[in-house]
């Protein structure tokens, strides 16, 4: 029996060995003779260029997104800082009394500067309303109501305790009192001390004169539709310490 030899008329049938060699050849950028495979080099450069272009594009997108996020934060912060209600026009007379006039146009929004005279006026008003006694029931009730309209927080409890201990209605028609206040002295940005004299009368005659000091702490609260006429600038007494000055 003779030996038969077969020759392939093309590429050899694929085997794991020759398939690997074929792929290796195709992937080479340098030909067997040492020259560069121009097509492969061009393809590699194109792929690299596209990768760099895509990377730059994503960097730009990331920067734009970050910038938008930061701008959004600033807008939110600004929105939070805006007044919750429309500001109003309030006039303050030479005695420090504030009067509500009306709302301010949105174009005039800005920080409100409260005159110092109004702050001290609130303290003097509290002292006067606390210690003034009159013979008319309705007028006396109005004094006490105005004192409450100036107080917030701890000061409301302190005022209630004071009125219970010094109830003017117990002496209605019997005794009257007048108050003479000195100008409050500023201690800090929110605290003031005031000295004042209280004169007590009975049957039209002066029977007693006492001197007091009051250390008041003031606070600022949002003006609402309900309080715009009672306290137009939102300046309240938040606490106070009352002491009688004993003469030696």
Image (tube, rainbow, N blue to C red):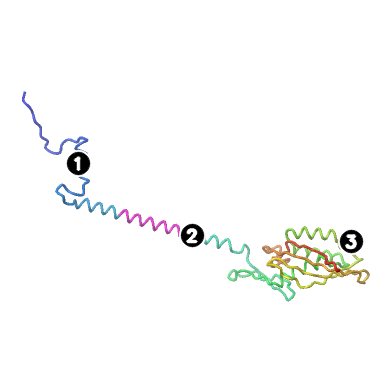
Q: In which quarter of the image is residue 180?
A: bottom right
Q: In which quarter of the image is residue 83?
A: bottom right
Specify the segment rendered in magenta: 50-68
Q: Which mark identifies residue 170?
A: 3
Q: Position of residue 146 (x, y in %)?
A: 78, 65
* Quadrant into which the C terminus falls: bottom right
Q: Name the residue: 83% across, 65% down.
A: 244
Q: Dot 3 lies on which element?
A: helix
Tag 1 near tag 3, CB within 8 Å: no
**Residue that extends furthest to the right in the rendered view of this protein:** 203
Q: Residues within 10 Å of mark 1 (few under 14, many from 20)?
A: few
What residue does disc 1 label? Answer: 22
Tag 2 near tag 1, CB within 8 Å: no
- First along the sequence among labels 3 and 2: 2
SS majority, magenta: helix
Name the residue nearer the viewer: 89 or 174. 174
State the CA–CA distance, disc 1 to disc 3. Answer: 115 Å
Question: For this view, does 49 lie left or right of residue 125?
Answer: left
Q: Where is residue 36 in the image (x, y as percent from the top left)?
A: 18, 52
- First along the sequence among labels 1 and 3: 1
State the CA–CA distance, disc 2 to disc 1. Answer: 55 Å
**Numbered-mark total:** 3
Residue 247 inside the magenta-drawn segment:
no
Q: Which of marks 1 and 3 is in front?
A: 1
State the CA–CA distance, disc 3 to disc 2. Answer: 65 Å
**Residue that extends furthest to the top in the rendered view of this protein:** 1
Q: Dot 2 lies on which element?
A: helix
Q: In which quarter of the image is residue 159?
A: bottom right
Q: Dot 1 lies on which element?
A: helix
Q: Residues within 10 Å of mark 3 (few under 14, many from 20)?
A: few
* Quadrant into which the N terminus falls: top left
Q: Which mark identifies residue 70?
A: 2
């Amino acid at each position: 029996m003779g030996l038969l030899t077969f020759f392939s008329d093309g590429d050899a049938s694929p085997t794991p060995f020759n398939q690997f060699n074929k792929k290796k050849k195709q992937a080479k950028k340098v030909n067997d003779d040492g020259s560069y495979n121009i097509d492969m080099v061009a393809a590699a450069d194109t792929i690299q260029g596209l990768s760099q272009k895509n990377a730059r594009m994503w960097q730009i997108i990331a920067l734009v997104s970050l910038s938008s996020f930061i701008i959004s934060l600033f807008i939110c912060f600004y929105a939070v800082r805006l007044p919750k209600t429309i500001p109003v026009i309030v006039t303050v007379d030479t005695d420090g009394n504030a009067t509500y006039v009306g709302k301010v146009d949105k174009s005039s929004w800005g920080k409100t500067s409260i005159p110092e005279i109004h702050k001290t006026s609130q303290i003097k008003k509290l002292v006067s309303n606390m210690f003034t006694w009159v013979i008319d029931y309705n007028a006396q009730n109005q004094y006490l109501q105005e004192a409450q309209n100036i107080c917030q927080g701890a000061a409301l409890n302190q005022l209630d305790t004071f009125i219970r201990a010094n109830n003017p209605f117990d002496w209605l028609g019997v005794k009257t009192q007048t108050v003479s206040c000195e100008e409050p002295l500023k201690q800090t940005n929110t605290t003031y001390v005031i000295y004042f004299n209280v004169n007590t009368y009975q049957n039209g005659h002066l029977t007693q004169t006492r001197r007091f000091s009051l250390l008041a702490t003031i606070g600022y609260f949002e003006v609402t539709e309900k309080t715009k006429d009672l306290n137009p600038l939102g300046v309240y007494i938040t606490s106070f310490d009352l002491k009688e000055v004993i003469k030696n």
